[in-house]
């Protein structure tokens, strides 16, 4: 469920799956004021640029909170390689969160990585037009990008029901109902840097 939800938050498209919701790639397409072309005004993509990444971060309003960068693991490696090549060191400030996990940061933004969906398909690979990928910058919270839950039998949240053992196999079946989506509550709560090619 987590993998499917993560993939939908990025690539959800109600045109191809009416039971899903539109993800960040659909809400911030090229041409949107909050979508920035990493290659400037050229049509062809380009490797990641610090200048364009900083422009993306500056365009997003934190509304008193903090910003996060959402990218693939390959993009995080490209970002770190760019930093080593230009300033001689990694870009990361690291800290440990409440769960004991290491958190990577760039320009005071936490870096969140998205890997693969439930079918093993890379969620944010270099599979956008021209073999490119994107980075998203978001402010999470009740004034920015926030989750939504719909009601099920009069209650909000996840409904879990044990349906018992199936008759033809030694397994139990559990039904999970969760009507979920997300909203971008301010025009500058999320942005996208697109047209990023793999590093040379």
Image (cartoon, grey):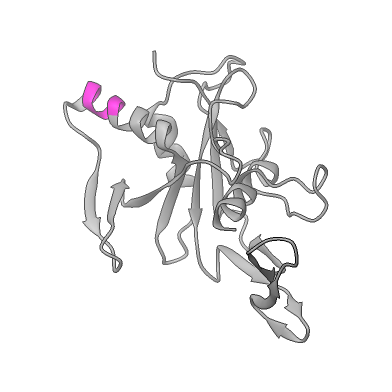
Question: Does 60 sit left or right of 177 as displayed?
Answer: left
Of the pair 123 and 187, the residue shown nearer to us: 123
Report if residue 85 lies within the magenta region. Answer: yes
The extreme bottom residue here reads 154
The rendered magenta stretch, by its main secondary structure, is classed as helix
Q: Quadrant of residue 129?
A: top right
Q: Is residue 30 visible?
A: yes
Q: Is residue 154 above or below residue 118?
A: below
Seen at 81% across and 42% down, the residue is 16
Q: Between 196 and 118, which is closer to the camera in this rendering? A: 118
**Residue at horizontal 61%, vertical 60%?**
186
Q: Nearer the viewer, residue 23 or 42?
A: 23
Please say whether residue 58 is one of the residues in the magenta stretch: no
Residue 28 place in picture, x, y as percent: 65, 43
Q: Is 31 drawn above or below residue 163 in the view shown?
A: above
Q: Quadrant for residue 79, please give it.
A: top left
Q: Quick check: can you spot residue 60? A: no
Q: Which residues are magenta?
A: 81-86
Q: Which residue is located at x 64 percent, y 75 percent?
A: 158
In the picture, measured across the screen, residue 38 lies left or right of residue 165, that is left
Residue placed farthest to the left in the image?
A: 88
Q: Position of residue 14 (x, y in %)?
A: 79, 49
Tell me the quadrant of the picture where the N terminus can be found.
bottom right
Q: In the displayed structure, does residue 18 sit left or right of residue 44?
A: right
Q: Residue at x 60, y 26 (%)?
A: 127
Residue 110 x, y percent position in the rendering: 36, 52
């Amino acid at each position: 469920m987590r993998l499917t939800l993560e993939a939908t938050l990025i690539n959800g498209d109600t045109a191809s799956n009416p039971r899903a919701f539109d993800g960040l790639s659909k809400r911030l397409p090229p041409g949107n004021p909050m979508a920035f072309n990493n290659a400037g005004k050229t049509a062809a993509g380009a490797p990641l640029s610090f200048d364009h990444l900083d422009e993306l971060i500056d365009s997003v309003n934190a509304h008193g909170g903090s910003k996060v960068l959402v990218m693939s693991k390959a993009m995080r490696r490209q970002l770190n390689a760019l930093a080593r090549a230009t300033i001689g060191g990694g870009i990361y400030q690291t800290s440990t969160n409440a769960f004991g996990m290491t958190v990577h940061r760039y320009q005071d933004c936490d870096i969140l990585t998205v890997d693969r969906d439930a079918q093993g398909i890379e969620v944010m690979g270099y599979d956008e037009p021209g073999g490119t990928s994107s980075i998203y910058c978001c402010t999470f919270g009740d004034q920015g990008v926030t989750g939504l839950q719909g009601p099920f039998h009069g209650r909000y949240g996840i409904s879990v029901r044990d349906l018992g053992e199936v008759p033809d196999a030694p397994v139990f079946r559990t039904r999970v109902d969760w009507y979920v989506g997300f909203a971008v509550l301010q025009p500058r709560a999320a942005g996208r840097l697109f047209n990023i090619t793999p590093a040379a």
